[in-house]
Image (cartoon, rainbow, N blue to C red):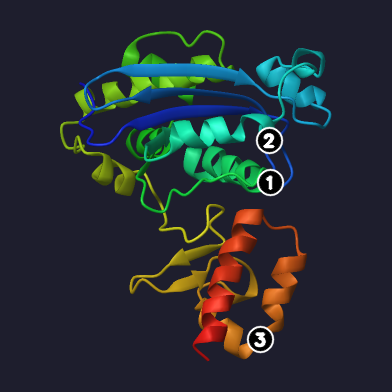
């Protein structure tokens, strides 16, 4: 079943130096941009991360330091990626927890525009886990009847993710063919920041989602323990989390 879309939607996948959103870097990005009229554009770009690609990461995606030695840095492609992604809804596999937060980190480091506050985000893995609870390779086999060749290459994973979502729409008539509804269904939490350190509660208020203040409103923590803001800003948190927290802190200071 074709996806019912009103805005262009980008299916994308990252291959990286590791799984630490705050510290690891992109070594390959691949996307398929789908327009409402059905037109598709795709691209795969190797990226020099500027750091060593650990052997464990290479074992997964097959990309070595030598493979990206002459590739552009992310900063050199950031404006291009920003332009391609601008105004588009997003979809990926485990994208809410990993690909989108890590891409946001790279964009912040490159001082490039990456505003997804008004975009819808579909995580195909979440839909799959809610329906079947398997891996991408199993999802591809289950929904599409195909074996996923070259798993952990960004291009193959991106194409598989796109095909799986279309097959999910065919298999589950109860799934709405609507990007906004799919975005809501494929999210476990309403995150304030990409890493989910802060989420919205049932009243739309920002609350911490970790640590000793888990479940407490951010503004109440600012009032009770203002040093917590400094602790987080000095801690090992993603740039996006710190940027979002700072915006909340500035707003709190203005309204004191």
Q: Residue at x 56, y 15 (%)?
A: 151
Does the image show residue 179?
Answer: yes
Q: CA distance from mark 1 to mark 3?
A: 29 Å
Residue carrying label 2: 75
Q: Earlier in the sequence, mark 1 or mark 3?
A: 1
Q: Residues within 10 Å of mark 2 (few under 14, many from 20)?
A: some
Is the N terminus in the top left, top right, bottom left or bottom right quadrant? top left
Residue 211 is marked as: none
Residue carrying label 3: 225
Question: Residue 211: horizontal and vertical position, in percent?
Answer: 64, 69
Question: Residue 45: horizontal and vertical position, in percent?
Answer: 60, 19
Q: Nearer the viewer, mark 1 or mark 3?
A: 1
Q: Residues within 10 Å of mark 3 (few under 14, many from 20)?
A: few
Residue carrying label 1: 109
**Element under disc 2:** helix
Q: Left or right: where does residue 134 sit relative to residue 209?
A: left
């Amino acid at each position: 079943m074709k996806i019912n879309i009103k805005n262009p939607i980008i299916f994308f996948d990252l291959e990286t130096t590791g799984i630490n959103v705050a510290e690891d870097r992109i070594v390959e990005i691949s996307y398929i941009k789908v327009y409402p009229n059905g037109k598709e554009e795709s691209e795969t770009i190797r990226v020099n991360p500027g750091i060593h690609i650990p052997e464990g990461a290479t074992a997964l995606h097959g990309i070595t330091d030598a493979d990206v030695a002459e590739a552009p840095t992310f900063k050199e492609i950031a404006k291009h990626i920003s332009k391609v992604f601008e105004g588009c809804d997003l979809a990926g596999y485990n994208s809410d927890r990993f690909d989108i937060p890590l891409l946001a980190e790279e964009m912040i480091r490159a001082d490039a525009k990456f505003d997804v506050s008004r975009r819808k985000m579909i995580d195909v893995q979440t839909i799959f886990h809610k329906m079947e609870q398997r891996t991408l390779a199993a999802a591809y086999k289950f929904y599409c009847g195909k074996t996923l060749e070259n798993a952990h290459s960004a291009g193959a994973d991106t194409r598989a993710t796109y095909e799986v979502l279309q097959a999910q729409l065919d298999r589950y008539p109860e799934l709405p063919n609507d990007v906004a509804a799919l975005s809501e269904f494929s999210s476990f939490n309403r995150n304030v920041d990409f890493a989910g350190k802060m989420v919205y509660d049932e009243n739309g208020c920002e609350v911490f989602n970790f640590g000793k203040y888990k479940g407490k409103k951010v503004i109440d923590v600012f009032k009770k323990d203002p040093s917590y803001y400094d602790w987080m800003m000095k801690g090992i948190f993603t740039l996006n989390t710190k940027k979002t927290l700072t915006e909340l802190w500035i707003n709190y200071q203005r309204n004191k």
